[in-house]
């Protein structure tokens, strides 16, 4: 009879004792439930092998336990372990638990094997403990039981103080699904672990290899020692199991190998718990989470081109990505290119772009879990071995240990959009579309500009349009429109403006659009400002004088030094096709240009290009529009010749700079208070490569003391990366030193302080 413990008079002490007793009872019940599961499995083994009923199997186990002096649960676990596969690199079945040899009567005879090398008693005991622990892992019914089983382990190492079981999320994060030895607060803090690279559990998942830390600083992570084991199943990282100790861990290579070998039975049981049983939508506590096996079904439902890429590893390094599944649009594009989608990889399909851009970018997505957007990616036919060239926008996102890549191919309309807007601006024209089925009217940006109306206001109503046109001309418009709508005639009419458009003449052309059955469904049209210039003799004389003066200025060599509002420029004249120019604008801004022409006759071609650039600058074109105009000029005047140009417009007062680039000549910024850098911005194709090229503008703010360097592509003769590194290393650029005796044009702009600040 148990002696009754006197009740404590302190309520807090009494409550603490009750909690401790209840926890002990709870742990005992959990241990008993796990032991019962092992015993039931062992009974099943005997029923199968000896063709006896479960009660007889239990009696056999009890009798054998009595004769061998081995605990019933240990004997049952050893019997179950004989059916479990041995860990890789430790596949030697000679080691066993004391009394385990008596189980041979239940095992079918095997073919005799050659005599093995004798195994030490320590290794034999370690092997037996590992087999027993593997068997217990295989009986865990939940992730928490799996963690508790590992927490009770001591197979050559001290029992861990904390065990966590984490599942891999689609974005690379780890979700806590089971734990032992963690407080409620710690469990809440580690409920979802983002892909932070310094954490052992994240490193194990990303490298697909065990991570062991035997002696960490006391304030580091949760434990002084930790081992993180990746759970690999069918070449997928299902999650991570982590064992932690409060004190430094001292284990030899043999024990470490068995510690790492726990990953296999843990991964096998994790996969079994995660697999939903028949008639159940989830299992093992993974409720409501999407299985990676459904990825093909999800991707097949996408309308845009999309592929799921599986990383290929060489050790812990990703060396390629293979296409695992794709959307119908992706396979259609692959078929059009004559590619085998079932055996394609990033490096085999896109050898140059894949090795230089996509492989490191997708590896970073796997490593960090952060999605990636790549705009205006050029897939060149001659470089990649494709049947056609494409410009695409790519989006990549991590899904478990895969990457989902979707893309959009720029259509012909996308490629021509900026070019058409430029044509509208140069021609002082705009266009409209009237859908007769819906009544919707759409205006182009050029038409809004002509009418002096904001695009946010939308096209004007008939009542708003009437005050903009001369009443006498407006009277004949209904008849002309009726002829277009009823008889399908093309409308051509010139109208005089009124109100804010007074003094201007507008040429309107409208073309009816019909269905195959002849039904009129839309009217497309253009409006162009054809106002003739005013014929004032004095104005004509002044304009002629300005043209002569401008021509003289354009033909004259640009100054080596220039000072404007908030701007000081020093330049170095070049030769052999290298040139620069400085063009002041009427609004107080300044356009800076540096270019280089390739091929024979480069000097004359460079001068022609410089004069055309200056003319476009005087006309008020922005950097992107100026480069587009120069590209059209070069394609028309000198087909086959190419050139590189950087155009930068310094805003009035030197507050900011906007630039566009044709080639690899991105400006370099030398801030007064920070290290030199390459400003963020896209590169464009060199001039003269092809028709219809559009260029993008970038912008950067300027501070007093900043400097901006413009240079030709010839300065990067040693390669883009090496050339930029050399330029950035020059803290205070010296143009003569940078040129190194070469005939290259260079331009350095300094911003001593923005005026008006």
Image: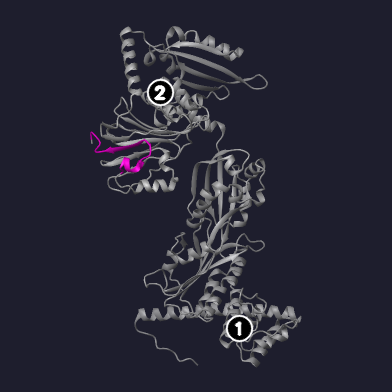
Q: Quadrant of residue 58?
A: bottom right
> What label sits on residue 73 in the rendered view?
1
Q: Which residue is mark 2?
A: 453
Q: What label sits on residue 475 in the rendered view?
A: none
**Which picture quadrant has residue 712?**
top left
Q: Nearer the viewer, residue 384 or 478?
A: 384
Point 43% across, 63% down: residue: 198
Q: Residue furthest left?
A: 756
Towards the viewer: 527 or 352: 352
Which quadrant of the figure contains the C terminus? Answer: top left
Q: Which residues are magenta?
A: 733-756
The answer to whether any part of residue 634 appears in the image is: yes
Q: Position of residue 265 (x, y in %)?
A: 60, 72
Q: Is residue 589 magenta?
A: no
Asked if one can make out residue 52 in the rendered structure from this viewpoint, the answer is no
Q: Position of residue 450 (x, y in %)?
A: 42, 20
Q: Secondary structure at mark 2?
A: loop
Discs 2/1, front: 2
Q: Earlier in the sequence, mark 2 or mark 1?
A: 1
């Amino acid at each position: 009879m148990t002696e009754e413990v006197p009740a404590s008079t302190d309520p807090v002490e009494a409550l603490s004792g009750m909690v401790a007793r209840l926890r002990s009872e709870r742990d005992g019940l959990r241990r008993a439930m796990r032991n019962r599961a092992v015993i039931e499995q062992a009974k099943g083994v005997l029923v199968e092998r000896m063709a006896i009923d479960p009660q007889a199997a239990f009696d056999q186990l009890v009798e054998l336990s009595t004769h061998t002096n081995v605990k019933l649960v240990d004997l049952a676990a050893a019997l179950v372990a004989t059916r479990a596969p041995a860990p890789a690199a430790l596949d030697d079945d000679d080691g066993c638990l004391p009394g385990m040899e008596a189980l041979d009567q239940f095992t079918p005879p095997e073919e005799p094997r050659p005599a093995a090398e004798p195994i030490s008693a320590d290794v034999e005991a370690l092997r037996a403990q590992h087999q027993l622990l593997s068997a217990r892992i295989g009986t865990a019914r939940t992730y928490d039981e799996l963690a508790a089983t590992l927490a009770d382990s001591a197979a050559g190492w001290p029992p861990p103080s904390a065990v966590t079981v984490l599942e891999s999320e689609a974005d690379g994060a780890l979700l806590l699904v089971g734990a032992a030895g963690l407080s409620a607060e710690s469990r809440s803090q580690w409920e979802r672990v983002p892909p932070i690279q310094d954490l052992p559990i994240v490193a194990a998942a990303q490298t697909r290899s065990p991570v062991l830390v035997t002696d960490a600083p006391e304030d580091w992570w949760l434990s002084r020692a930790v081992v993180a084991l990746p759970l690999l199943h069918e070449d997928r990282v299902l999650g991570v199991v982590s064992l932690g100790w409060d004190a430094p861990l001292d284990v030899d290579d043999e024990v470490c190998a068995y510690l790492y070998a726990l990953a296999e039975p843990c991964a096998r049981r994790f996969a079994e718990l995660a697999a939903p049983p028949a008639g159940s939508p989830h299992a093992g506590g993974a409720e409501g989470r999407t299985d990676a096996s459904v990825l093909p079904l999800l991707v097949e439902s996408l309308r845009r081109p999309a592929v799921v890429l599986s990383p290929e590893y060489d050790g812990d390094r990703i060396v390629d990505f293979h296409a695992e599944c794709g959307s119908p649009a992706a396979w259609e594009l692959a078929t059009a290119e004559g590619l085998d989608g079932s055996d394609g990889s990033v490096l085999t399909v896109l050898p140059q772009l894949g090795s230089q851009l996509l492989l490191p970018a997708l590896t970073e997505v796997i490593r960090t879990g952060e999605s990636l957007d790549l705009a205006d990616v050029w897939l060149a036919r001659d470089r990649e071995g494709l049947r056609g060239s494409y410009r695409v926008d790519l989006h990549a996102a991590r899904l478990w240990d895969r990457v989902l890549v979707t893309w959009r191919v720029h259509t012909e309309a996308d490629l021509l959009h900026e070019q058409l807007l430029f044509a509208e601006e140069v021609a002082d024209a705009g266009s409209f579309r009237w859908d007769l089925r819906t009544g919707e009217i759409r205006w182009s940006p050029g038409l809004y500009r002509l009418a002096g109306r904001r695009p946010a206001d939308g096209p004007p109503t008939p009542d708003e349009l009437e005050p903009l046109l001369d009443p006498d001309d407006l009277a004949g418009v209904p008849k002309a429109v009726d002829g277009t709508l009823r008889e399908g005639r093309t409308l051509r009419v010139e109208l005089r403006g009124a109100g804010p458009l007074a003094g201007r003449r507008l040429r309107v052309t409208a073309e009816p659009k019909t269905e195959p059955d002849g039904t009129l469904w839309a009217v497309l049209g253009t409006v162009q400002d054809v106002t003739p210039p005013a014929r004032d003799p004095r104005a004509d004389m002044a304009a002629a004088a300005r043209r002569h003066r401008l021509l003289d200025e354009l033909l004259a060599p640009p100054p080596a030094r220039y000072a404007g509002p908030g701007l000081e420029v020093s330049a170095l004249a070049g030769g052999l096709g290298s040139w620069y120019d400085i063009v002041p604008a009427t609004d107080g801004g300044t356009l800076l240009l540096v270019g280089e022409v390739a091929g024979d006759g480069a000097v004359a071609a460079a001068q022609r290009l410089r004069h055309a650039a200056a003319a476009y600058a005087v006309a008020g074109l922005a950097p992107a529009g100026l480069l587009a105009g120069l590209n059209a000029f070069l394609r028309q005047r000198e087909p086959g010749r190419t050139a590189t140009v950087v155009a930068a417009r310094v805003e009035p007062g030197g507050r900011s700079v906007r630039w566009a680039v044709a080639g690899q000549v991105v400006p370099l910024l030398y801030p007064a208070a920070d290290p030199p850098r390459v400003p963020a911005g896209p590169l464009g194709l060199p001039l003269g490569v092809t028709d219809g090229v559009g260029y993008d503008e970038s912008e950067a703010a300027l501070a007093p003391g900043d400097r901006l360097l413009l240079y030709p592509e010839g300065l990067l003769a040693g390669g883009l990366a090496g050339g930029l590194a050399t330029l950035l290393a020059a803290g205070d650029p010296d143009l003569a030193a940078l040129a190194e005796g070469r005939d290259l044009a260079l331009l350095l702009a300094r911003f001593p302080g923005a005026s008006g600040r």
